Image (tube, rainbow, N blue to C red):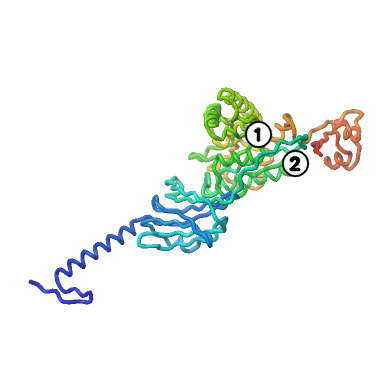
């Protein structure tokens, strides 16, 4: 019988060896299990006006516990059998409602992530499966705890003052969703936001019009939330701006879309079945006190009028885009895009070009071309509302062709604007007019 001598581990007998090996195997198995668990590989943060989104890149789906702590405000995420890569520790993302991110091993096999917060929040978390750009992700959305409830509209007892037209401009994608990407690395979300801002600046400079940027920075907004933001702003028109992408880099040209009839039908069914039917979606008429048939008729009438307006605006827009470059299709296209499904707001989606086409990618990167696109969109908007002024709005500038016998003072009086305003609006250095001259009549302002 062989004899085992005592060593530094204190092993004396074969039984000791057996117990030592058994314990070592258990330790090794536990270590391998931890190593084989989920790894948190990185963190990204996007701060939107109404919430903050934190995205954790993970090696696989995670099961986690989430709870809040006060004094100071923190949100704790505990994940079983998980580890944090060094990239999680080097430069944690902060911003929005998050002031800091910490990680630690809370107890063996449990990774604890602590989000340090500016205030108490309402959290929402979910896993995302891999796509062609990212792997597994754990998403945590933080909403302010003391968010104000919507203020009910008060019906005025006196005539309302005239208002500006409101144009909602939606830059597609954003945040963790870059959209299509060109060969030079140009991201759709960046290009369309730049074009949207340029369009907003042009609209803001137009008397009688006011822009609303649906997405003002690099963050993601859900598709229905985009519609809701437009509706809450009282939008008269919704424009969603995108840049197309396709596997064949030869595809080129711009396109303009409106909602398909099939998409409108499915949306009407959803609205009629949803609890939010009390919202004024049928041309300002509340649906919650109507029977089912009447609600359907009212909503159908509203959608029909909205689609007709959308088609006309889109046609104007496509015509203007043809003046500055190639279009992918000759006519307005129809599709079931979710952002076009508002039954009460004329909505169009503009695909400015194919970012996957090298030539068009270069154009989209060019600030002068971005300005041309924004200008073409503005002309399309003005073409429509110039022909179809909305009741209760100031209206847009109108064009007047000078006729024989006209004087500047008579034209100002006829259109109920001051002589000084008319002169300044047209940058006239004198009151001398020639037959055939074209004057811009500024919109009428309310009191």
- 416 to the left or right of 239: right
| Residue 377 screen position, x and y as percent | 67, 38
How packed mark 2 is, by other alpha carbons closer than 10 Å (few <14, some 14-19, many 20 or more), is some
Residue 3 quadrant: bottom left
Q: Disc 2 to disc 1, how far (Cα)?
A: 17 Å
Q: Residue at x 58, y 39 (%)?
A: 353
Residue 55: tell me if it is visible: yes
- 7 to the left or right of 229: left
Provide the secondary structure element on which disc 1 rests: helix
- Viewer-nearest residue: 325 or 77: 77
| Residue 60 screen position, x and y as percent | 39, 51
- Viewer-nearest residue: 227 or 173: 227
Provide the secondary structure element on which disc 2 rests: loop
Quadrant of the drawing holding the N terminus: bottom left
Residue 182: tell me if it is visible: no
- 82 to the left or right of 115: left
Q: Which mark is residue 206?
A: 2
Residue 229 quadrant: top right
Quadrant of the drawing holding the C terminus: top right
């Amino acid at each position: 019988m062989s004899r085992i001598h005592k060593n530094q581990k204190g092993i004396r007998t074969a039984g000791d060896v057996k117990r030592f090996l058994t314990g070592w195997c258990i330790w090794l198995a536990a270590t391998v299990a931890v190593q084989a668990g989920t790894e948190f590989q990185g963190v990204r943060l996007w701060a939107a006006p109404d919430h903050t989104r934190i995205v954790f890149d993970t090696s696989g789906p995670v099961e986690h516990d989430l709870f809040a702590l006060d004094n100071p405000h923190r949100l704790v995420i505990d994940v079983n059998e998980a580890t944090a890569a060094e990239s999680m520790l080097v430069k944690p993302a902060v911003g929005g409602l998050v002031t800091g991110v910490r990680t630690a091993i809370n107890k063996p096999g449990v990774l604890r992530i602590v989000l340090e917060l500016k205030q108490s929040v309402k959290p929402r978390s979910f896993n995302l499966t891999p796509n062609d750009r990212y792997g597994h992700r754990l998403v945590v959305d933080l909403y302010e705890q003391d968010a104000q409830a919507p203020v009910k509209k008060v019906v005025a007892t006196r005539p309302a003052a005239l208002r500006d037209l409101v144009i909602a401009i939606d830059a597609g994608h954003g945040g963790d969703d870059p959209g299509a990407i060109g060969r030079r690395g140009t991201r759709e979300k960046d290009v369309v936001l730049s074009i949207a801002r340029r369009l907003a600046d042009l609209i803001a400079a137009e008397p009688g019009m006011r822009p609303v940027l649906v997405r003002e920075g690099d963050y993601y907004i859900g598709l229905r939330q985009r519609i809701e933001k437009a509706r809450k702003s009282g939008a008269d028109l919704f424009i969603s701006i995108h840049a197309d992408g396709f596997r064949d880099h030869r595809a080129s040209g711009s396109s303009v879309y409106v909602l398909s009839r099939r998409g409108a039908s499915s949306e009407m069914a959803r609205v009629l079945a949803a609890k939010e039917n009390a919202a004024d979606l049928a041309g300002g008429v509340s649906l919650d006190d109507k029977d089912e048939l009447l609600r359907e008729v009212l909503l159908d009438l509203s959608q029909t009028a909205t689609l007709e307006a959308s088609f006309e605006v889109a046609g104007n827009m496509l015509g203007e885009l043809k003046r500055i470059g190639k279009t992918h299709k000759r006519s307005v296209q129809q599709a079931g895009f979710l952002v076009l499904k508002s039954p009460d707001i004329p909505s169009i989606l503009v695909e400015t070009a194919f970012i996957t086409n090298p030539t068009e990618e270069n154009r989209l990167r060019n600030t002068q071309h971005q300005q041309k696109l924004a200008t073409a969109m503005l002309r399309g908007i003005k073409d429509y509302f110039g022909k179809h002024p909305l009741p209760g709005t100031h209206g847009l500038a109108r064009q007047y062709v000078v006729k024989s016998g006209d004087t500047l003072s008579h034209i100002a009086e006829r259109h109920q604007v001051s002589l000084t305003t008319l002169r300044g609006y047209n940058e006239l250095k004198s009151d001398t007019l020639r037959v055939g001259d074209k004057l811009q009549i500024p919109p009428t302002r309310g009191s």
